[in-house]
Amino acid sequence: MNLTKKMIIATTSILLVLGSAGGFAAEAGAASQKQTKTQATSSKSNLERQKKEAMDIFHPKEVKPGHLTVLYDGTDNTLSFSYLGITSSDYDEFTKLLSKYKAPELQQPGGLPEGYMFKSGEIVPLYPLFHTKPYESMLKELKAEAKGKKYYAKKLKWNEAGGAIMIFSKDSDIIRISSQKVQPFTTEVTRVPGKGEKFENLSINGIDALYSTNSNDLYSTKLRWEDAENQLQYEISTYKKSHLTKEDLVAIAESMIQE
């Protein structure tokens, strides 16, 4: 065999080896990509399953009055709460609920405009608000219970109300009066008006109050003040189209503060 033929055979052999190695590398790369894709799909599927399981607990199909659940979201490290208050259309029964669940004080004010009658009362559970120590404590607790899961939910038991609401109506007009237990924030929180909303500072019987109008809320006109001594916040609110004036709401507040 001459030198030229030997060189051709040797070169061909090298190319075959290199070609085989390239083929193995390509196959290995494809297998690695396939494995990565499979892992990503599996991870996404697992996350979706976690979320569904948590949401089934957080928002069950059947909810009874007094329902309270909490959802831990590990994707942004937050808590969300879902509840259904306990209501009554009988005023005497409502006052019994206030006592039973240690709700913040709330009674029918004497300064209601003529013709407005008690329609319903509601108590809502006490649950921790964002930027409070109880919230941070519960967040830490649920994160531990989640054991690495990104979504985790559970039902909460409660026997103390965090707020109470009374609805008074006259024809299609509504006055909503609420009381809420104040939870001290761990950081300074300043409420600013929303788009189009207007704030006006008032003084009612020597107590600072905030009158706000034109918000996008259902009850867009609000009069709010705090009872610092008892750590309670009160609010009187009406629909945007309500014919009641600022003076009407102030008169209600004055009767509540005097009582």
Image (spheres, rainbow, N blue to C red):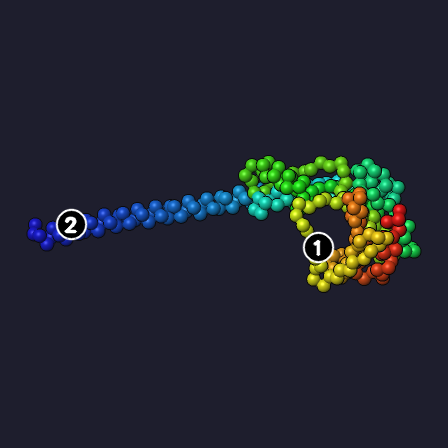
Q: Residue at x 14, y 53 (%)?
A: 8
**Which amino acid type is marked by label 1?**
Arg
| Image location of residue 112, percent across then percent down | 89, 53
- The answer to whether residue 116 shows anywhere in this view is no
| Image location of residue 33, percent across then percent down | 40, 48
Question: Which element carries disc 2, helix, strand or loop?
Answer: helix
Q: Nearer the viewer, residue 76 or 84?
A: 76
The residue most toward the bottom is: 196
Name the residue carrying label 1. 191
Q: Nearer the viewer, residue 251 or 188?
A: 188
**Which amino acid type is marked by label 2?**
Ala
Horizontal side, residue 3 vs residue 153: left or right: left
Q: Are marks 2 and 1 in contact (CB under 8 Å)?
A: no
Disc 2 crowd rating (10 Å Cα; few below 14, some 14-19, many 20+) is: few
Name the residue carrying label 2. 10
Horizontal side, residue 139 vs residue 127: left or right: left
Residue 257, placed above or below residue 243 = above
